[in-house]
Amino acid sequence: MDRQASPPAKQPLIPLNLVLITSVVLLCAILTASGRVYYFNGPCGVNRVKDAGLALAGQFGAYQGAHDIAVSAARIALAGPAGELQKIYLETEKIEVPGCMEHAKSELVAMMDSDIEVFLVFMSEEASKADVTALMAQSSEHLEQYKKELKMVRECAPFCP
C-alpha cells in the first residue's frame, strides 16, 4: 500500500574536462577573431593605413603633375597652375587618415604649402633668390619627412604609437 515513489533517473553529467576544453577553445576563437579585426581595421589597422596611404599618394601624384606644369609656365602665366596647386592642397587637407598617419599627412600638406609659397613669392617679382631658395629647401625637407613618416607607419601598423 505504501509504495514509495522511486527517485527520478539520474541523467549523465557532462564531464567537467569537456566543459573546460570547450570554453578554452571558444575563448581562443573569439580572441583570434578580435585580433584579426584589430590588425586589419583597428585604429591604425593595415587596411586603414593602406587606404589612407593610397589616398595621400594619389594626391601627391596629382600635385606632382600640376607642379611640373607650373614649373614650365612663364611668370606671367603662373596664376592658373598655382591655383591648381592650391586646389590639390585643399583637397589633401580634407583627407581623413588614421591617427598614426596624421604626422605624415601634415608633412605632405606642409610641403605643398611651402611649394605653393615659392610660386606666389616668385610671381610677386619682389622676392630675392635667397627667399625662393629657402622656401624650396623647406618644401624639400617636408617632403623627405613625409616619406620617412609614411615608411615608418607602414612598418609599424597596426601597432603604431
Image (tube, rainbow, N blue to C red):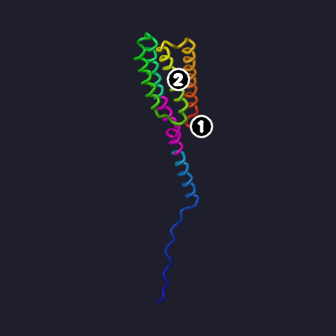
Q: Which region of the structure is painted magenta?
A: 34-53
* Tag 1 residue: 161
Q: Which mark is residue 70?
A: none
Label 1 secondary element: loop
| Residue 18 percent across, percent down from the top left | 56, 57
* Tag 2 residue: 111
Front position in the image: 36 or 19: 36
Which badge, 2 or 1, comes first in the chain's sequence?
2
Disc 1 marks a residue whose amino acid type is Pro
Rendered image quadrant of residue 77: top left
Mark 2 or 1: in front is: 2
Front position in the image: 79 or 104: 79
User: Which residue is at 51% across, 13% downward?
Assistant: 126
Q: Main secondary structure of the magenta part?
A: helix
Give the position of the C terminus as an image quadrant.
Answer: top right
Disc 2 marks a residue whose amino acid type is Met
Query: Quick one: which residue is furthest to the front in this view?
Result: 126
User: Which residue is at 50% across, 68% downward?
Assistant: 11
Q: Residues within 10 Å of mark 1 (few under 14, many from 20)?
A: few
| Residue 83 percent across, percent down from the top left | 41, 20
